[in-house]
Image: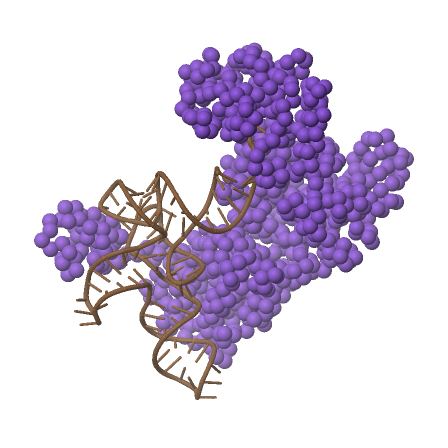
Chain colours: A purple, B brown
Amino acid sequence: MAKKYPFKEIEKKWQDYWEKNKTFKAIDFSPKPKFYVLDMFPYPSGSGLHVGHLEGYTATDIIARYKWKKGYNVLHPMGWDAFGLPAENYALQTGIHPRITTQKNIANFKRQIKAMGFAYDWDREINTTDPKYYKWTQWIFIQLYKAGLVYQDEVPVNWCPALKTVLANEEVVDGKSVRGGHPVIRKPMRQWMMKITAYAEKLLEDLDTIDFPESIKEMQRNWIGKSEGAYIIFRVEGTNETLKVFTTRPDTVFGATYMVVAPEHPLLEKIVPEDRKKEIEEYRKQAAMKSDLARTDLAKEKTGVATGAYAINPVNKKRIPIWVADYVLMTYGTGAIMAVPAHDQRDWEFAKKYGLEIIEVISGGDISKGAHEGDGILINSDFLNGLNVEKAKEKIISWLEEHNLGERAVQYKLRDWVFSRQRYWGEPFPLIFLEDGTVRLLDEDELPLKLPDIEKFEPSGTGESPLANVKEWVDFIDPKTGKRAKHETHTMPQWAGSCWYYLRYIDPHNDKEPWDKKKEKYWMPVDLYVGGAEHAVLHLLYARFWHKVLYDLGLVSTPEPFMKLVNQGIILGEDGEKMSKSRGNVINPDEIVENYGADTLRMYEMFMGPLEKSKPWSTSGMEGIFRFLNRVWNLYIDDKGKSREDIQDIEPDHRIKKLINKTIYKVTNDIENLKFNTAIAQFMIFVNEISKEKIKPRSVMETFLHLLNPFAPHISEELWNRMGNKEILAHLEWPEYDEEYVRDDLVVIAVQVNGKLRGQFEIDIDAPEEEYVEKALSLERVKNHIRGKPIRKKIVVKGKVVNLVV
RNA sequence: GCCCAGGUGGUGAAAUUGGUAAACACGCUAGGUUCAGGACCUAGUGCCCAUGAGGGCUUGCGGGUUCGAAUCCCGCCCUGGGCACCA
């Protein structure tokens, strides 16, 4: 291990200084331009901070410190997303209240984060479990409720009969509970729902207005899952009932040879003839037993039963059977389809299995081998014959609309959001059920509705949360109405607090409103948001949804909360595997800070590779960075701890001017583009070069510390201070580069013969082409390769290459 | 199965976006310093042939476009992430 510069001492010194002087306090309404740089706030788990957290936090910290130096008023806050399952499960095992665990974990996280020297404005710290915070989470819920976006519904949840509790998706693997391995079934239960589907179109459209990674946008698009098509209404023979289907392929309606309804479809009860009722009921029961997984993944073959009822195809009056099958889902479209086996592979498989008719209506495929889903010319389709798919779609939709048999329609895969959890450790719902069956939203003066303290964290056994056991809390007399009332025993999901935390940072101590509108207007939107890709869809979609509602209610000033999003990659263990306790490959940041210091850890995390990439940890690579920082230290400080005497007030020569200007240029651009790894490579080049100088110009050595400061704030601040500077580096202006010295005038040109490298020469970049060619031809090696062959073509790219074609 | 991202030395990676592939670092080798180890300093280090000068090959694989391809196009293979009968 390298010789150690006194990092411990100086890191503590400067962290104390920044804290005491509130160096990084964000100023509301400062006349400087604002910059809001946000981290995804952590869930403070018991295992402490992960080196993966620190990657994103270091990246945003470099940006924040850089922007400070560029003269911005920077908002760079941190807080705790502290509701959620792990603390509650821990309480189940140990009986320790989640509030206690949470407090302890937060204290630990905070200690670890502070040890990194991040430039957070700690006066804006928030905690989602603080009643002063969740008062406003509840308040926002009420606004959503009043906007008509909240309702109750019976939806299937993961119910584990053995554990007598509802499980989250991540607690269920392969249809079994993670704890105990008991079977889990889908059971409908009353839940609070949020109508995110009402915003599907806006959420989709506005993706085009924000700077997110294309892959994240694509995931969100797929999740929203817009498809365009038509509703078509089929009459059920012998009844007054109709069956409405959604299809993206209305052009194939002449090929519809049967219908399928989902087992849960309400129409079934009305249309199934007496003699078939028993059989259908049996099939419905079986389908209800199956989880989504069993209906999809595990089912290799489609199953279904004919209902005995028939529908009439509206376009050709053909009588077609109605089947029930669980490959049709009640939750998408209308829960019923027209089956066109010739042109839909799923329908084709089903038709083959049950011997149903297959009629080809689009030419170009071989329907004996499988469905033809692509384009072609319409056949067997009366007035659509001869058209291609696209034209046929248009024509049939107009026809359906004219005859009142259907209409153009859009469907989304996106479903409404289940907003209840049958859990203790979450925000209580700010509403009560009155004895007359009505729901009363709490008034603002009744907020927050605090989570009552409990001692036993076991679930109630009925699928309700542990809150159901607190009888005196659940049943009470409502003081406002005098009526008997009940509190909701469900709590909100962890997403609730994280859906708006970036707004609370703007005005964290306001107890009159969630945030001041003027402050919101000043600070929003978030200019840069950095976090893990695991939140690609859910958190980012939910937060965008709430923000759009708040925008429509006039509570925020921008339609989107986050202007630019960057995902950091995962840091793997030294073995290239995901870090985990069981693998024993976890790197503990405390140990790194203890042995090498925070500046080394910060710099190494940035040097590992591009921010967005997954990459393995390497202890020797990290030690390389430590060596580098020691070299930097030794460049300024001698063995006796004194400033070195070879740093002098001299004018840098041309070569050193070029070196420092190129370094400013490269580092500035790389920070702007979040390419921290190559900025650090440039630092190393600078240090390698300047080390060779006997006398080092003071101005250049000072400029270098400015550049290094956002990356390694402690060592740079200390060296700056030891050079005799009074003002602190953190707020001093970022250096500018001089274009004249960035540009190379004398360049090395590669000479190719037939595209192969054969030599090189040095030349003034602006020399005429003839001179380039002349120099190229004068090279011995080049001569050898063109000897005796006529030159057919000479390609000269100034500053780059000369290529001679023979 | 579908969608997205990505495959470059022994390792992490870089390449001004079509112009000298491998910058910077890790590791390794040799030398210096040292009682020794560590640390530090210097030099070398893509692969193959050659004593050398030099030559050949090389960015997952196979084609193509171009004076010139890691970069653009077509097909295939592999890895990671996401989705799951969405009508």
Whole-percent x and y of residue A514?
Answer: 70, 43
Of residues A9 and A751, which is closer to you in this image? A751
Q: Residue at the location (58% across, 14% down)?
A: A319
Where's residue A555, x and y in %?
66, 37
Q: Nearer the viewer, residue A710 or A472?
A: A472
Residue occupying image coordinates x 63% and y 23%: A306
Vertical placement of A668 versus A285: above or below?
A: below
- x then y, percent, for residue B75: 37, 40
Q: Quadrant of residue A471?
A: top right
In the displayed structure image, the side of residue A623 where residue A764 appears, left or right: left
Q: Residue furthest left?
A: A788
Q: Can the viewer see residue A722 in this picture?
A: yes
Residue shown at 74% from the left, 52% from the top: A88
Identify the residue at image location x=79%, y=57%: A95
- At which x and y percent is residue A466? 80, 47
Query: Is residue A277 or residue A260 the one in the foreground?
Result: A277
Residue A150, compared with residue A581, is above or below; it is above
| Residue A498 visible from this viewpoint | no
Q: Quadrant of residue A201?
A: top right
Depth order, front residue of A108/A746: A108
